[in-house]
Image (spheres, rainbow, N blue to C red):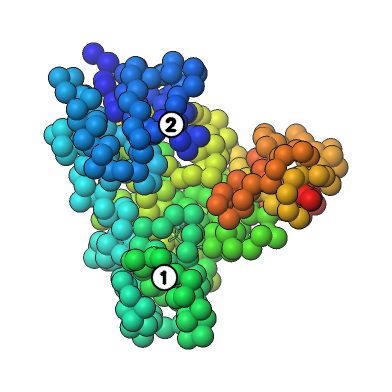
Amino acid sequence: MAPRVVFLSPTYPPEMRQFTRGLAEVGAEVLGVGDGRPDAELRRYLTDYLQVPSIMQEDDVIARVHAWLRGRQVDQVQANWEPLVITAAKLRERFGLPGMSVDTVRGFRDKQLMKERVAAAGLRVPRSQRAHTAADVWKAIEHTGFPAIVKPISGAGSADTYKVGSAEELTQVLSRMQHVTEASVEEFIDGEEYTYDAVCIDGVPAYENVTRYLPNALEMRSQEWVSPVMLSVRDLSQPHITGGIELGHGVLRALGMGDGMVHMEWFRKADGEVVFGEIACRPGGACIVDQINYTSDIDIFREWARVATWRSFEAPRERKYNVGVIFKRALGHGTITNIVGLRDYLARYGAHVVEDNLLRPGTPRRDWKSTLLSDGYLVVRHPDWDTAKEISFAAATDIKMYAS
Ligand SMILES: Nc1ncnc2c1ncn2[C@@H]1O[C@H](COP(=O)(O)OP(=O)(O)OP(=O)(O)O)[C@@H](O)[C@H]1O
Ligand SMILES: [Mg+2]
């Protein structure tokens, strides 16, 4: 019998369509739940769809799904979008289905709890404390010292995440963070920043990826003039990288990972020390999954689905390329008017460009603060790291976009 999978929010974010396709392609019956309206193509992958008023209203969603499924047998509840991973776990518990419990998923969602659980396993995390009030933050700073990071306990997209170097800066930041009810105050880790991504079966990685952020994610997200680069690392066996992968394995065990994908962030300090950043029990956003697919020429959307439903991973693990994603931000406000340097860039490196998603003249600019996709991006790849980096940096510096 085809496994019956409840999949939350198949319409949003856009890549959820691909995970829905994956589920259908491995033979699952997909019961979608969301507040969007699936188009005809997405409908083809869905056996049924429950439209709810707001997918973020957790209690309401749980009550509606419960009523909708009455009398029907389901095998799984899955969510690949960060704000819904707890909702999925609550539904699993409600229906008595296998999969990660609410408590386990909290370890991937609450940034203080995750660090406590990871530290308890003897792994290196930034010194940190939970804070509910401005007074708590000042107290935590005594423990972490300056510079420190202040960020929401369940944040995403680096929203409301600040590096503070002094008491004056902290005073300013606190006034901007008044709407945040719970924060994590952390020792600032000065180092290179990487991801560790994995597709897991019972917490054991079946496929792994590491991507370097250039510059670090917080700088990408706070400085508009930067063209952020994310470069997947083809050779995972190099000493520079293996420490982060071992940390990833330890973290998966410490947090009790089950089946599915994880996206972890970690730092490598100049002295070689490897430090945990954060982890989520869902795929990375901002093109990470596409990057994995281009790294190994596989379809990780479908392989995630195979793992989630059949607990098996069948794609080749060979890593063929370092894959760079370069995000661009136009100079000026309003509508894109001009792209300079793209023709020369393509003449030089076109053979290594696998996607050109730069917004074209006439298109309104995107809000770079709310989406890393910014005013579009290029995807490039090359088997040699230094060459892949050169091609990526050339796109960052030699292509300029303008708006007015
Ligand atoms: N303790 C720290 N030391 C140094 N940098 C940090 C620290 N904590 C966070 N950062 C920086 O801030 C960024 C955002 O923090 P974090 O990843 O915890 O938040 P997030 O909002 O979940 O991010 P995203 O959703 O973009 O992954 C990190 O990727 C890193 O660049
Ligand atoms: Mg993060």
Query: In the image shown, does 159 or 22 lie closer to the viewer?
Result: 159
In the image, is 142 to the left or to the right of 380? left
Please tell me whether mark 2 sits on a helix, a strand or a loop. loop
Point 55% across, 30% down: residue: 297
Q: Residue 178 carries which label?
A: 1
Are the residues at dot 1 and dot 2 in contact (C-beta closer than 8 Å)? Answer: no
Decide: is 69 above or below 198.
above
Query: In the image shown, does 45 or 266 lie closer to the viewer?
Result: 45
Residue 302 on image: x %, y %: 43, 27
Q: Can residue 318 be seen in this view?
A: no
Q: Of the two numbered discs 1 and 2 on the same chain, state the one appearing first in sequence.
A: 2
Point 54% across, 59% down: residue: 217
Residue 257 on image: x %, y %: 27, 46
Please tell me whether mark 1 sits on a helix, a strand or a loop. loop
Decide: is 308 above or below 167.
above
What residue is disc 2 on? Answer: 36
- Disc 2 residue type? Gly
